[in-house]
Amino acid sequence: MATRTENPWIRRTLIGIALLYLGLFIFLPLVVVFYTGLSKGLAVYFQSFSDPAALSAIRLTVLTALIAVPLNLVFGIAASWAIAKFDFWGKNLLTTLIDLPLSVSPVISGLIFILLFGAQGAFGPWLMDHGIKVIFAPPAIILATIFVTFPMVARELIPVMKAQGNEEEEAALTLGASGFQTFWRITLPNIKWGLLYGVILCNARAMGEFGAVSVVSGHIRGQTNTLPLHIEILYNEYNFTAAFAAASLLALLALVTLFLKSIVEYRYRAELKAAVRTENV
Amino acid sequence: MIKLLKTKSTLPGFHIAFGYTIFYLGLIVLIPLSMLFAKTSTMGFGEFWSVVTHPRTLAALRLSFGASLIAGLINVVFGFLIAWVLARYRFPGKKIVDAFVDFPFALPTAVTGIALTALYSQNGWIGKHLYALGIESAYSPLGITLALIFIGLPFVVRTVEPVLQELDVELEDAAASLGANRWQTFTKVLFPNVVPALITGFTLAFARAIGEYGSVIFIAGNMPGKTEIAPLLIMTKLEQYDYSGAAAIAVVMLIVSFTLLSATNFLQWFFSKKIGMN
Amino acid sequence: MSIDVKQISKTFGTFKALDNIELKIATGELIALLGPSGSGKTTLLRIIAGLEKADHGEIYFHGKDVRTEETKDRNVGFVFQHYALFRHMTVFENIAFGLKVKPKAIRPSPEKIKAKVHELLKLVQLEWVADRYPSELSGGQRQRIALARALAIEPRVLLLDEPFGSLDAKVRKELRQWLRRFHDDLHITTLFVTHDQEEALEVADRVVVMNKGKIEQAGTPEEVYHNPASVFVLNFLGNVNLFHGRVEETKATKMYVRPHELTVSRNPISANSIKAKISFINPAGSVVKIDAQTSDGQLIQAEIAQEEYKSLKLKRNEEICLTPKNITYSEYDI
């Protein structure tokens, strides 16, 4: 074993540096959120959530996630089925295009919907004639969120489906199962943890997205503010306690996400290795 | 056409799954993104050029790319160290620390922004010490870099850690049996195997940092020409209803970051090939 | 049910997996598709099952063209190389699957399904594992459950892809004999793929030897072993020695002799006898294996019975005479 590790002092020093760095850069910001939010006492903390603007922001945030996540879930299943189970020309290009939104700046993600649906945009005049409001209204917020979280389920499912191979599905077909029965009874149970993993990550991003939503929202209090935008407004009004109280809610969401993610991750990894394992026994 | 599309499997559902994938991708991603280029093409080259070479634009792009580069490099150093510690050593609370590395992924950027500002501003827990030393840690390029370090760290750790875990321990034993000391084993045997993952991690962190908005704007100060990042400049143009100006800067950002991504992809491919990994 | 394979061809990219395959299988036959990897045997099996579509050619089940029938409608029992048992289901649920997915109108009642599953478990002698998951079974048990699952739908034909490929030697032997007996009882038309010539010769009624996407020979184990249609078949079904020389009555310049078809003696017994020096003896086994070298350096392998070995009292470095009892002539190399 001695050949595989450093002397204890080097080891301790390295661990020390890593923990100090993580503590200072990652942990301290979390502490400061809760500290500042609670700095004027619990009464003030909870009062900031009873503000109608805060409640409406929470409602819109949840609504956005409730629409964006299922849509991207359905897409993720379709895309991973096509990509992992079949060979076709241009598959790598398709995979790259699916990941594209992750490398686009959030601000640009919002901008493109303004260019599409804004007053000067491609469909702007038509929408205005028909009295449909997209930009500076919830539809644009939801669209921008869908764009930003677009690949998040697909990119978790593709490797799982690839790892599982096609044999179990083929076995189901030889036993007389229809395509839908095969998917529902064989594929879905085999990918469920990967699916859940993707949904958890997708949801966290959908609820927390700031840049893209900020561009298209119009910041109308009580109407087009999501929770992150609400925090910005409070902060810019120097209402720090309320801003950090709202922020603590999102920080809590992040902690819950991390917790669920670590639980699911373990089983998700098992799914990734499952196909290999059964072959080797 | 159908024959050309599908060559491998007789499982059902390809056409509906593939069709829906293309439809949804086009609707949500490709058509909206193509608007950027459509809008820019209405400008004429002279106008486009004057927008993107305007000193304020150039300063913003320089700041965005420069700060992202520095943050990325710092993350490579400390990300590697943290990945090493997590992959190699055992210590109490390791599981929690390991899960916590992903915290910057999970924390909404606006929360990151105000939290970092509170920490590093003149009255903040860390800021007050730095300001006492004459270091302006908020509303400065340093503040921007700090935010980008925060959001980029997990990318490096999460790409390097699995590579370190999967490296065959026999490699180290072999090096040791051939008379290498620990430092030689590390620099000549272990590190070269990790280089491709480090490049990937750096690329991911860098790409994310260039476009980052939420966690930066609170701590940036947003002074045109000094602490104004490119995404913020796009935002400002939008608020002035200068949509084509905003689109022009967006196009430049996209092109530059895709060029850099391709370059690093090539580098990564090159190094992987060299050490015979895939 | 009979199967008629007509002019089947299949290409993957630039690789020709199957090249104009013709094969007739009679009702109730037990057929081995034998060949090295890449010979196309698994592809042929998958095309019969409908898991792969042929580029050209036709497949008839009992005289009916099945090209337009999907896998799920072909009613074939397929046992996969790695079994493909459904991981998230118990053994019972695995076997019941094919019955449960039948359309409502023809789906058996839950009681009937239960009875059928237990009947099958009894048939494969694994009644006690009904509630276990596949991960809790041994390789041989998985193999038999996969077979039971395939039989549940009362298939018209049974297709097995390398059925014993991932099992250890002892279990392989047992399951082989078990499959033979099992086929004798049920008489379902059965095709199995293997690369093990011993397995093919021991189990099958008829062996189809494949190489590079073509059928080299199809015949009873006896035919393919004793009257190989090509040098490939000769070589693939066992070790063989090559001799160069000119044979008057044929154009052939090469002669092939199996190790056990050489007579070993102290002195020459005919004009064909060859002198050689023993370089290695392996007496451990049912036969004694002898390696000998001729004066021009050629290595010859021979196999003799234990009693013969004892009576001859052979030792290393001794000179012996080798005389072929049976020669295959050819002008081709192996």
Image: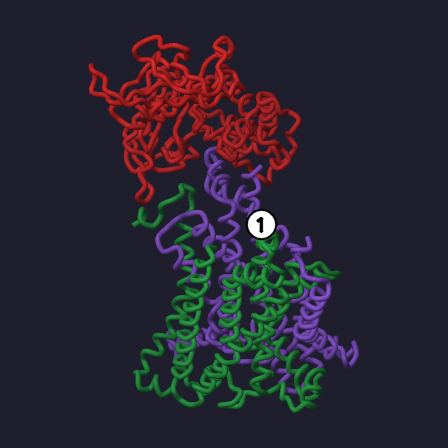
Which colour is chain B painted? green
Q: Residue at x 49, y 29 (%)?
A: C163
Q: Is residue C83 above or below residue C243?
A: below
Tell me which colouring the rendered structure shows.
by chain
Q: Nearer the viewer, residue B47 or C82?
A: C82
Task: Count how many numbered circles sit on residues in the image.
Answer: 1
Which colour is chain C painted? red
Q: Could you tell me if residue A66 is visible in this image?
A: no
Q: Nearer the viewer, residue A176 or B154?
A: B154
The percent position of residue A38, horizontal first and vertical second, equals 76, 77
For residue C167, what is the image quadrant?
A: top right
Q: Is residue B141 above or below residue C113?
A: below
The percent position of residue A229, horizontal first and vertical second, equals 59, 77
Q: Secondary structure at mark 1?
A: helix
Q: Is residue C257 above or below residue B254?
A: above
Please give the letter of the chain rendered in purple.
A
The percent position of residue C181, horizontal first and vertical second, equals 51, 16
Q: Nearer the viewer, residue A195 or B70?
A: B70
Instruction: Tell me the residue that label 1 is attached to.
Output: A192
Q: Residue at x 51, y 68 (%)?
A: B204
Q: Residue at x 46, y 82 (%)?
A: B234
For residue B185, what is the image quadrant?
A: bottom right
Q: Could you tell me if residue B102 is visible in this image?
A: yes
Category of crowding for the residue at label 1, using alpha-carbon neighbours closer than 10 angstroms: few (below 14), some (14–19), many (at least 20): some
Q: Is residue A141 above or below residue B49?
A: above
* Amino acid at circle 1: Lys
Q: Specify the subunit that label 1 lies on.
A: A
Q: Nearer the viewer, residue B247 or B224?
A: B224
